[in-house]
Amino acid sequence: MGRKRSAKQLEVLSAAHSARHPHGKENIVLTVASPPRSATCTQVYFSTLRDRIEQQSKEIQSLMVSNTQLQSENSTLQAQLDVSDKNILTLETQHMLTLEKLSNAQDDLRDAYNTIDEQVTAIKHLQQRISHLMHDKSVLVTKISALKQDVVEAVLRADAEEELSASKSLHISRLLSNIAHLEDTIPSNRRKHAELTKSLRATQMRETQAKTSLEKARETIHSRSKWSGMKGRMYSSQYRSLVLAFTRAGCAQARLGPLLSRVAKVFNVNIKHTMSRRTVGCIVTEAGIKVTLQLGHELARTKAICLSSDGTSHRNIKCKARHLTYATPTYTVNPNEPQTAFRTRLVDVDHALDHTAQSQYEGWEIASRKIAETYQNSPLSCRDALDGLSYDADDMWRRMVAHNADHAKDVRASAGKCVDKKQLVAEMDLGREKIAAMTDEEAKDVLWKVVEEMCDDPAGLDPNSLPEDVRAEALQSLAKELGSAHFENLPEPQQHLLTRCVIAGCCEHKDPNCSAYGVKGMEGAWVPLGLTPPVLLANKDNAATISLSNGADSEGVERAINASARGGHKLDLHRHFFTKVKFDVTGEQSTVKFPDTSNNRFRTHLTGAAELVAYHSAYLDFFHIIRDSKQTPGLNHSEQNAYNGLNDLATMTECCVMTLYKYAVSDPYVAAIRASGVNHLDLGPLHERVVAHIEKLIAKPDLLLNPTASCEDATLDGRPFWDQFTVDSVHFMSSRLPHLEPILIAFLKGTIPAWKRFSAEFDHDGLIHSLTPSEKLLMFIPPTNDANESLLGGWRVHARTRSASTVAHFSASEAYHRNNTEAFADAKLDTEEDTLYIMCLARVEDASGAMRKFCDELLEFKQKAAEESRAKQKSKADDAVARISELKAIPIVLDPPKLTKLTKAALRKQLDIRRELLKESVIAKMKLGDMKNKPEMLKEILA
């Protein structure tokens, strides 16, 4: 009880005493005397005080636990707010995806709505939780204040007690320090509360922003759900491009507008303006005009042009396809890609009255004039003129350096006419240069002389004021005359430079043509070698004639045998006929696939022979199935022919020969010419290798026939066979084919003259061999004519499936996509005056009635051809009557001595009497070319 207090305790007691006795003296510390009470009362008092202190300690501990819980709840709330932030970020991501994926807009919006509702609910729960925490905190603060007051009162009461133990005072000091610590944690809790409040406000702001973005997304989707496709009062280029893509895919023009609307509705887009059939047709015509402008623009820039063309017939109407190959811009926006490259551009697909060389040449003339007129009158030509570019109808002939097509005579004649036109243009240019070098007086005098020669009555004309048409015609004639004379005086190298044009033949035609010559050589080798030829595969009528005839030497049997064919080539056709018949009710085209050998497809006969060799036993089983599956078992005549051919060793020998040639020569050759970027000018060494390789195979046929021989030595390219299984099948069958080697050699020998003939443009004395490397770099000739061949086949399919379409629309659509005209239009035809020019020209072309005019011309042409044919037949009949009358007037000489005294001309008359009047079969079979001399004529007459 009498223990000494510390200085701090004294200060506390003094402060408490001063607060309790404010009127007391300052700086005087009085010792509070213990109240006079008994020891028992004191003990009870201290016991009570101890209990109260312990109770207060427990309350303080509970407050500390509550504070800890509050901190834990604050941490939990912070974690929940972080989760809310992540959810809001997810919401923003979903919002961006909503903008990017309009097709899934409804689903994304629905998910966004659900997510936002969940976040709003979570935020409301958080707000309620924060409100509860704030209320709990205020309650705790009130309790702490009350506890502080109680502690102070307890301390004052303890100070009044004299016998206050030191341990209790120390405990009170600890309580006071704890209270001070709790007071120190209040600011941090306030800061956390402020942070939570700030985070809550940010969450609310993000929610507001999300709702705003959602509204914007709704507005964007709503605005994009309506598409007019218009630019001003005309359809946009995007809409036009879409129309061209749909029409090329096969959509009918009348159904394209409704179809586009239905497609747009799938993506929740409403097209305001639906195109009519007429508008679609006009857009296709405009595409063709863009193609023509592209050709004019590109031809004005190029220096060397290669022409190529081909023709076909569809429903007895001739159709032509024309292409040009030259260096052209690529219109690429990637600077790392080449800006210019050699491209083959489609000029047009058009009808023609016939397939003559003159018609083909005139088609090129019309195409050249059309390109020049369309380009020269366009705004694009005016812009190109600023760069020094121009193009007229003769520029195509000036820059023509090559002509590529097949090996037909009419095509070669057409190429010759194109070369003649090139020379004529060169002469005209030389003549114009001569006229330009003259003085005005000289030009006037020379021109007047030409006018005097042209006009029947030149006296009525004034030399100083000639009519424009007369003057133009006279200038044309004068330039031609002067240019022709000047051209003749030029050195031969310079003439050659002005008229140089490489006439190339399609390599894809070279291979089947040479294969056909090999087949002829193979067919003609059986009899000279003393071998039994393949079985005769006659048609039904000829087979009946042969089997029912009495004598094998009769004229009918001989005619039937000569009209029939045999061998592997014919077997391919027979196998095709009953698997790919045009009348699809019959045939086996759905049961088994076979190469299309009847439609002149490239190399299909060789492929068909390889098919029969590789699956020989399977095809025999297939015929057994056909025979036994019929209601009346048996094979029809065509099936029996094919079955007989498959069982004939000589026929299968020819099939094996064709198969070996296919994999050793044909396939490697075609792979070489079809490689990417191959120039026809560089194929001379390849054709020399072909001839050398065939000669090597003739000298060493075991390279193909010996199964152990290296395939690298047997193939043209030195690589393994493309189909080792089929070659192995040939080797397997060779043991049953004793004449395989001589027939193979005969086939190969038959192809060598053909290869030399069809590759004559690569001869060392030819034009291609004389070209310098720099000249070859300026020229590019496609090795094949596939561009024209495929296009004409495409037109036949297009016309068969879309009979309402016209060849002009087909040509425009194909050229627009093949020539990459869309990229050209985006790069060059980007002004409003270009668009108006194209639209006006399209309307003029649609109103021209070109198809109706062609039909009228075709009817007139056919009528004229019929009249000429009738006149020719009448003239032929009249000549025959006159010939018979002439022969009847000549007496028939039968006495041999008198015949020997006749002259050669008189003997020819006697020979004609026996051929044409008496119709003696022996003389009728002889060729007049075999009876050129008098003894030969006498021998035949007296025989």
Image (cartoon, rainbow, N blue to C red):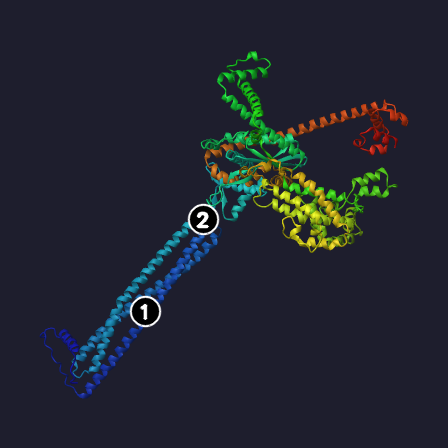
From the viewer's perspective, is 658 left or right of 837? Answer: right
| Between 129 and 853, the one nearer to me in the picture | 853
| Vertical side of 867 occupied by 750: above or below | below
Quadrant of the rendering where the C terminus is positioned: top right
| Vertical side of 163 occupied by 803: above or below | above
From the viewer's perspective, is 816 left or right of 707? Answer: left
Q: Which mark is residue 417?
A: none
| Vertical side of 481 occupied by 568: above or below | below
Q: Quadrant of residue 396?
A: top right
User: At which x and y percent is residue 25?
Assistant: 8, 75
| SS class, disc 1 | helix
Q: Residue at x 60, y 31 (%)?
A: 418
Task: Identify the amino acid type marked 2.
Answer: Ile
Q: Residue at x 29, y 76 (%)?
A: 61
Q: Which mark is residue 221?
A: 2
| Vertical side of 374 occupied by 274: above or below | below
Q: Which mark is residue 71?
A: 1
Task: Identify the amino acid type marked 1.
Answer: Gln
* Residue at far bottom of view: 39
| Between 324 and 437, the one nearer to me in the picture | 437
User: At which x and y percent is residue 831?
Assistant: 46, 35
Contact flag, marks 1 and 2 (Cβ < 8 Å): no
